[in-house]
Image (tube, grey):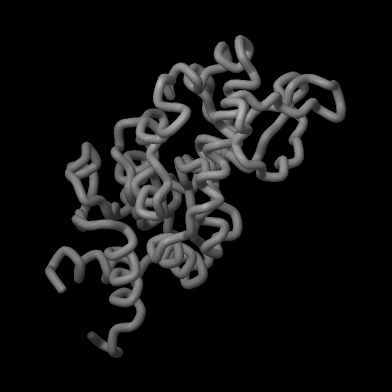
Amino acid sequence: MGQAARDAAELLGQARRVVIFTGAGMSAESGVPTFRDALTGLWRQFDAQALATPDAFRADPALVWGWYEWRRATVRQARPNAGHVAVAAIEARVPSSVLVTQNVDDLHERAGSAAPVHLHGSLFAPHCSGCAQPAPVPDLTEEPAEGRRIPPPRCARCSAAVRPGVVWFGEALPTEALEAAVEAASTCDLLLTVGTSGLVYPAAEIPQVAARLGAAVIQVNPEETPLDRVADVNLRGPAARVLPALVDAAWDRPHGA
């Protein structure tokens, strides 16, 4: 074990209030395509960013709903990886921990995390485009043979179209989720950032809030990111390999080691 890994294990083992902040790199290790890599097969001719807007949904709700149903089906075929399991283990070991994720999948929940803060919403939390009433998650179906379009369900309360429960370009992050993330980052003694580029704001501000207020920051990422200069320790490598080793080293070391 190198010095950086030893330092990270010591910080984690001593922490009492931990924030785990995860991004697309963690889900990519489970085979979930990152947003701009997600258009395959029937969807190759479309611009992901053009589909992920309120204007696109108003113009062609069946096209946008069909794409997000395809994305949800893709996520359902994926499985949590060892990194997701390690995050749940940290939460179990440190009761005063908060998981904040930029991912819109449910892999953290399926790995055992009870209540992730979803900064960018969730594929599994659709709601009405009119009155914002939460809507049931539709049963998964195969992509229709005739093409990409799937008409969205209608709201049981007001009959408006149900929309995907994700944050689209041009929309603000959910106020409650953002406030919870900032509060957690403001009061933690350790923030562990995993698989995020540090480029997407305002989410990328969360590790910087923790650092400014005196928390230690550990970054797990195969590549250099803008968060390198914020982190006290940078661990290079995939989350599925680095996080389980970090958890083992933090709490399974011989006494006094």
Looking at the image, residue 152 sits to the left or right of residue 186; the answer is: right
Q: Relative to 12, say whether 57 is above or below.
A: above
Does residue 59 appear anywhere in the picture?
yes
The percent position of residue 203, horizontal first and vertical second, equals 41, 35
Quarter containing the C terminus: bottom left
Looking at the image, residue 154 sits to the left or right of residue 142; the answer is: right
- Please tell me in which quadrant of the rendered image residue 234 appears: bottom left
* Camera-side residue of 127 and 179: 127
Looking at the image, residue 33 sits to the left or right of residue 241; the answer is: right
Q: Residue at x 66, y 27 (%)?
A: 150
In the displayed orientation, state which residue is furthest to the left. Answer: 2
Q: Residue at x 86, y 30 (%)?
A: 156
Q: Relative to 40, say whether 18 is above or below.
A: below
Looking at the image, residue 21 sits to the left or right of residue 110; the answer is: left
Does residue 179 appear anywhere in the picture?
no
The mark tally for this picture is 0
In the displayed orientation, state which residue is furthest to the bottom. Answer: 255
The percent position of residue 46, horizontal first and vertical second, equals 43, 20
Q: Residue at x 43, y 54 (%)?
A: 19
The percent position of residue 157, horizontal first and vertical second, equals 86, 27
Q: Relative to 125, say whether 231 is above or below.
A: below
* Camera-side residue of 232 and 52: 52
The percent position of residue 10, horizontal first and vertical second, equals 27, 71
* Camera-side residue of 6 and 162: 162
* Camera-side residue of 211 and 98: 98
Q: Which residue is drawn at 41% across and 35% down?
A: 38
Quarter containing the N terminus: bottom left
In the displayed orientation, state which residue is furthest to the right. Answer: 157
